[in-house]
Every structure is written in C-alpha cells, then in structure tokens.
Image (cartoon, grey):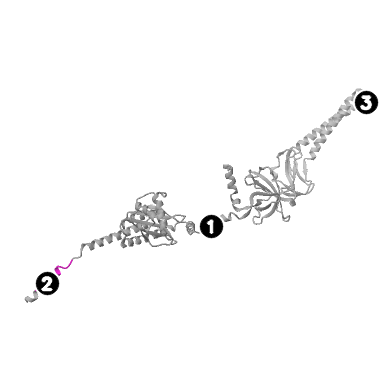
C-alpha cells in the first residue's frame, strides 16, 4: 500500500505544474485583430469615396492607420504619359513646379516603370542614379515602396509611394497589397463614369502614335490644292434689258405676272393717267378758245386794216395751244409701256409697285431670255483673291445641292459695292459651261471660285495670316 502512493503524488504534482501559455501570444492575436479591423475600416472608407479625389485623400492620409510610414505620395499620369505629383500626406495643395515635385518626376522617370507593371517595387537610395541621391537624402527616408494602380485598360494610371526609415516586413507588404486591391477596384469603378471618348483619346495619346499623326498632319500641309473661295450667287440674265419708267408718275397697273414670258408688243405696265387726262382737257379747251379768238381777229381784219397785227398774235396762240395739246397726248401715249423684245418679265411683286411714285428712267422690271442665263456672285472684300477671266466656278444651287453646275468667270468689278446681304463685296459674272438644261432665273446658291494652285497650309492659314498682318503690320 505504501509503495503505490508516491506515483500518485507525482502525478498530481505534474498536473499542478502544467505550463501556462505566454502572455505575448494573446497580445499578438489582439494586434492581428486590430489590423484586421483597420483593414476593413479603410476598405469601407474607400468604397464610400464619391470620386477619385476623395479616394486619393483616403490613400494618402488614412493608410497610415494600417502600417506606419513617414510619408505617402500619389502620382498620376498626365496626357503626355508622364507621372506628376497629385497628392501628398499632410498637404492640402500641391505645387507642381516645386523642386521636390520636379525631383520626384525625375526619380520616377529613371525607374522606367512599365505601362503594364502590376507588381510593387522596393527602392533604396543606393539603387538610384547618383545625381538623384542628394535629393533622396534631403526629402525621403531610406526605404521606399511603390505600388502601381491599374486602370480599366490594365495600364498603370497611378503610383502610390510609401516612405519610411524601417524595412518593410512581409506582413506589412501583404496588408498593403490586400488594401490596394480594394483601392484599385474603387479607382477603376469611378473611372468608368468618365466619357469613353476622352478615355480613348488619352489612351491614344499615351500609346505613342500621336507623333505619327502630327507628322502626317505636317506633311499634309504641303499637299497641292487650288486656292478657292465660297460666295453667295444667283442665276441672272447676262443680257437683260431694263424696262424703265418713261415719265414721272405713279404706277397704276402691272399687266404681267413676275417671271412671265411676254411677246413683242405686250403691255407690261401702265402709269396712272388721271393727271394727264385733266391736263389734256384743259389744253383742249384752251385750244378751242384760242381758235375762236383767231376767228374773231380774222373777221375784223377784213374791215379794219389795223387789226391784221392782232390776227397774227391770235394765230400764234392757236399754234401754242396745239403744241401743248400734242405734248400732253404724246405723254398719254407713253403711259402704257409695251415689250419691244421677247423674253421673261423679271421683277419682284406686283403689289410692291402698284401705287408707287416713280421718276423718269427708274427701272421697273427687266426683260431677259432664258437662254442668256448666267451666274452673278457677290464676293466679300475680306475673302477676295486674285482671279483671272475664265477661272473655273462651281455652283451649288439650294434647289439641287447634289448636282453642282460648272461655269467660268466672265467679268469682275474693280470697285466694291453693297451686296443684297448688306456687306461690301465685288460683283462677279460667269456663264455656264453647258448651255442645255439651264437653271431658272432667280435661283440662288453658293459658288466656289477657284484661283491658282497653292499648298494646303496656305489655303487653311491664309485668313489668319491676313488678320495677324492687319492688326500687327508685320
């Protein structure tokens, strides 16, 4: 019985002195739990950001809660494909031309970061160029971590830089990579809101093909082209005859419709003859009185020799009244104007002329032939170019814009006048090359008048060059 007791006692003693877990294990679990909470908090903050500016603020100023560092910097790619400083921890505004910003751009450019690089980089001051090491010692601590952020096209759109004095542990790198996956997801999601055209344009510029496009545009400026100008135009009759008022008066009636075809002898318009009829009646009565006075003087001359002088005076008054009556009757014959040639009566509107007072020689309408159709062009003074007789003209009428007509320059004016649009312009006339199926008189459109050959660059920049010389005198 006594021999079995010691082992029991030893067993109890062994159970009593079982080792207790060290307290540092609990502290490590608490630290990991805290880091996990911070990680979830930062992911929540990133997901709640409304735009990329708010996201960059979270990255630069709040990531410090997950892993300590002395400074964080955010650089994004501009339209030229270079990285520039956008955000820095603890700073509200960034000066792009500051010495630190310029040095940082040179540092990133020296690292030669690939456009599709998705892995982070650990950089030390010993691994950079010698000319950049002085700036590193002045502005950055020893250890630098660079994490790229890719856009929707899997290109590096942003770089996040973390700098501190201690080396980066594997746990710190794992946490930052896990957090930056969320940052990159938020960045790409907000970039999808941008205009696709702007994103494609930025992608095209960053691809390096822009310089070839610029080179092609420069070479295109030397393409030979004919110097030309556009001006308003109208189909007119080149040999039209003006029909003017023969006397002073008021238009009483228009006998034809606008653009109606008339024959020789057809009445075109008539003036109001009421005043002339009154003058004719007065002249007729005055002639009757003068003839009666002459008859009395002639009868008296048979009996009285001295009355022969009064007879000559009475006969003179008769001839005067007859001349006045003849003049009034001649005016009455000219009241109605008739066509002296076959053609079209061209004028605006009958109601615009009826009751309108006119003077002798004032044009009322035109008589033109459809076979004499040509083109009248009003070339603005600001667009004037050197033109020779026979220069080619291309006419685009409003009624048939898809069927242009060919013409050639016939006449140009040496003095500018006011065009129907109210601007100072030169008047040009041209005749159509094809004499069949001529357009109707009065149609309007746009004419392109061509001059000598030149290069495309001069054609495009002629007006700007003229404007610069006008204001500067160079």
Q: CA distance from mark 1 to mark 2?
A: 92 Å
Query: Of tags 3 and 2, which is closer to the observer?
Result: 2
Callout 3: helix, strand or loop? helix
User: Is 281 a magenta residue?
Assistant: no
Q: Position of residue 34 (x, y in %)?
A: 28, 59
Residue highlighted by disc 2: 10
| Rendered view: 16 above or below 198 | below
The residue where tag 3 is placed is 302
Mark 1 neighbour density, 10 Å: few (under 14) some (14–19) many (20 or more): few
Q: Which residue is mark 1?
A: 213
Q: Quadrant of residue 403?
A: bottom right
Q: Is residue 239 left or right of residue 222?
A: right
Question: In the image, which residues are magenta?
Answer: 6-19
- The crowd level at tag 2 (other Cα within 10 Å; few <14, some 14-19, many 20+) is few
Residue 14 belongs to the span the image colors magenta: yes
Residue at image location 75% in from the left, 43% down from the top? 243
Looking at this view, name the residue that lies furthest to the front: 130
Residue 404, image quadrant = bottom right
Q: CA distance from mark 1 to mark 3?
A: 116 Å
């Amino acid at each position: 019985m006594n021999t079995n007791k010691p082992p029991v006692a030893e067993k109890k003693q062994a159970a009593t002195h079982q080792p207790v877990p060290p307290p540092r294990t609990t502290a490590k679990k608490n630290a990991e739990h805290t880091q996990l909470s911070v990680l979830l908090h930062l992911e929540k903050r990133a997901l709640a950001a409304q735009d990329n500016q708010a996201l960059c603020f979270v990255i630069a100023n709040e990531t410090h809660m997950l892993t300590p560092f002395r400074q964080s910097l955010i650089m994004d790619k501009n339209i030229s494909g270079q990285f520039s400083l956008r955000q820095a921890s603890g700073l509200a505004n960034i000066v792009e031309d500051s010495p630190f910003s310029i040095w940082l751009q040179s540092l990133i450019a020296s690292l030669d970061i690939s456009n599709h690089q998705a892995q982070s980089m650990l950089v030390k001051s010993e691994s950079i160029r010698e000319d950049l090491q002085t700036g590193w010692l002045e502005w950055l601590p020893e250890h630098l971590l660079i994490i790229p952020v890719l856009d929707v096209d899997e290109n590096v759109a942003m770089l996040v830089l973390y700098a501190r004095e201690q080396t980066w542990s594997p746990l710190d790198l794992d946490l930052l990579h896990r957090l930056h996956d969320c940052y990159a997801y938020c960045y790409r999601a907000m970039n999808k809101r941008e205009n696709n055209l702007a994103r494609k344009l930025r992608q095209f510029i960053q691809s390096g093909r822009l310089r070839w496009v610029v080179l092609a545009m420069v070479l295109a400026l030397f393409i030979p082209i004919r110097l030309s100008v556009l001006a308003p135009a109208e189909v007119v009759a080149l040999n039209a005859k003006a029909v003017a008022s023969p006397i002073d008066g008021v238009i009483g009636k228009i006998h034809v419709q606008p653009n109606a075809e008339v024959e020789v002898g057809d009445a075109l318009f008539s003036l109001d003859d009421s005043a002339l009829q009154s003058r004719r009646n007065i002249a007729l009565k005055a002639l009757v009185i003068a003839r009666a006075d002459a008859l009395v003087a002639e009868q008296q001359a048979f009996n009285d020799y001295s009355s022969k002088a009064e007879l000559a005076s009475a006969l003179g008054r008769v001839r005067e009244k007859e001349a006045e009556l003849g003049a009034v009757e001649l005016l009455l014959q000219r009241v109605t104007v008739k066509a002296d040639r076959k053609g079209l009566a061209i004028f605006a509107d009958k109601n615009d002329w009826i009751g309108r007072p006119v003077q002798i020689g004032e044009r009322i309408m035109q008589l033109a032939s459809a076979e004499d159709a040509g083109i009248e062009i009003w070339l603005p003074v600001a667009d004037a170019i050197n033109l020779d007789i026979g220069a080619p003209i291309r006419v685009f009428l409003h009624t048939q814009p898809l069927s242009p007509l060919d013409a050639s320059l016939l006449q140009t004016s040496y003095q500018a006048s006011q065009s129907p649009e109210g601007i100072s312009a030169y008047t040009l006339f041209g005749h159509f090359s094809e004499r069949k199926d001529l357009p109707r008189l009065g149609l309007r459109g746009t004419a392109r008048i061509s001059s000598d050959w030149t290069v495309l660059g001069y054609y495009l920049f002629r007006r700007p060059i003229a404007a610069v010389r006008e204001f500067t005198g160079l």
